[in-house]
Every structure is written in C-alpha cells, then in structure tokens.
Image (tube, rainbow, N blue to C red):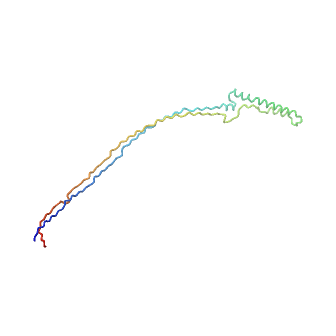
Amino acid sequence: MDLLRLSIRQAFGQIGIQTQNATTDIRSPMGQLSIEQQPAQMDFHSEPGELSIDSSAAWSALGSGPHLEWLNSIYSQLPNIALQGIAKIVENGNRMAQISNPRNAFAEIAQSAFSDDSPIEYVGPASNMNVKVHYEARPAVTNIEPGKANIEYTPMKPEVQYNPGRVEIYMKQMNWIDIQVTNYDWYK
C-alpha cells in the first residue's frame, strides 16, 4: 500500500552581531603658572651709641690732673708725713744720745738728711684701671614690610578625542521551511 507521507523540515534564522568598542583618548596639558615675588621693604635705623671715657684718674696718676685735686692729694698726705718726721727726729735723737756707739751717729744723720727722697707722692699709682670706659648701646629699630606674591595660573583645557564604536548586524543564516509529500510504502 502506498501511503503519502508529509515531511516538514525547517531551519531557524540566525542573526550575526559584530561589535567594536568605543575608545576615548584624553590628553591634559599642564597649565601655565607665573609667580612674581615683590621684594620686601626693609628699613633699619639705629642711633649711634654713647661712649663715655673718664680718664681723670689717669691724669691724676700722672700728676697732670686738675690743680686743686693735685694739691688736695698732697695736703692729705701731710699729717702722716709730719708724724713720720717726728718719729725720725726721736729716733735720731736716741741714736745721738748713745755715746757708747762706735759709729759716728752725727755723720750718718747728716749724710742721710741730704740723700733722703721726699716722702710726698706727687703722682698716683699707674694702673690700667685708671681709665673708666662706659658704652651705652642704642637699640636698632627694624621695620620690615613683606612683599606680596602675585600668582597667576592659566589652566589648559583637556584634549578629548572620542572614537565611537560600531555594531554590525547581519543575517548569518536565513530561515527556511521545506515541506515535501512523498510516497510511503508501509511494507518496505
């Protein structure tokens, strides 16, 4: 017996997609920086110090000081010199009173009267401490005004380049249906 057979075959359609990603190039150049610094204004002022030198003691020690001061120094020595003179007269008198002394006291006393130095000190002791030095410093006046800094910055725009991506869609396989009617032998 011949029968009819119906055969249906089909294929689905296939879509192909191909993509390319987008790219971005960014370049950022450096900005321009300008700095100008004004110099500071400085003002220094100092009054001269005061130096005082007192050399009156040095001049007195040299015997060249004020005349009244020189006379007072001599006058202040006289009471002590008078007492020393009286003591010397007593000593000389005691020597002359000793008759048993084999030395000639009169000749020695006469000789020493002409050779004695004066007991009066006409000049004072020499010393480096006779000159008094005093210095009084004056403070320095300082006035500083700082200079201002001028800072200018010019930014640069970034350079951006965009490359868009792309998408390509295409038919990879077309869809189809195949319908066939064929003879079918059951016993075959």
As drawn, 183 above or below 63: below
Please state if 45 lies on the left or on the right of 94 as rendered: left
Q: Quadrant of residue 124?
A: top right
Count all numbered tags in the image, as a single digit.
0
- Where residue 89 appears, x then y in whole percent? 82, 31
The N terminus, quarter of image: bottom left
- Where residue 116 appears, x then y in whole percent? 79, 33
Residue extending furthest toward the top? 68
- Where residue 79 appears, x then y in whole percent? 77, 29
Q: Nearer the viewer, residue 4 or 41?
A: 4
Please state if 17 lies on the left or on the right of 112 as rendered: left
Residue extending furthest toward the bottom? 188
Q: Nearer the viewer, residue 80 or 88?
A: 80
Q: Quadrant of residue 9?
A: bottom left
The C terminus, quarter of image: bottom left
- Where residue 136 appears, x then y in whole percent? 59, 33
Q: Nearer the viewer, residue 99 or 159?
A: 159
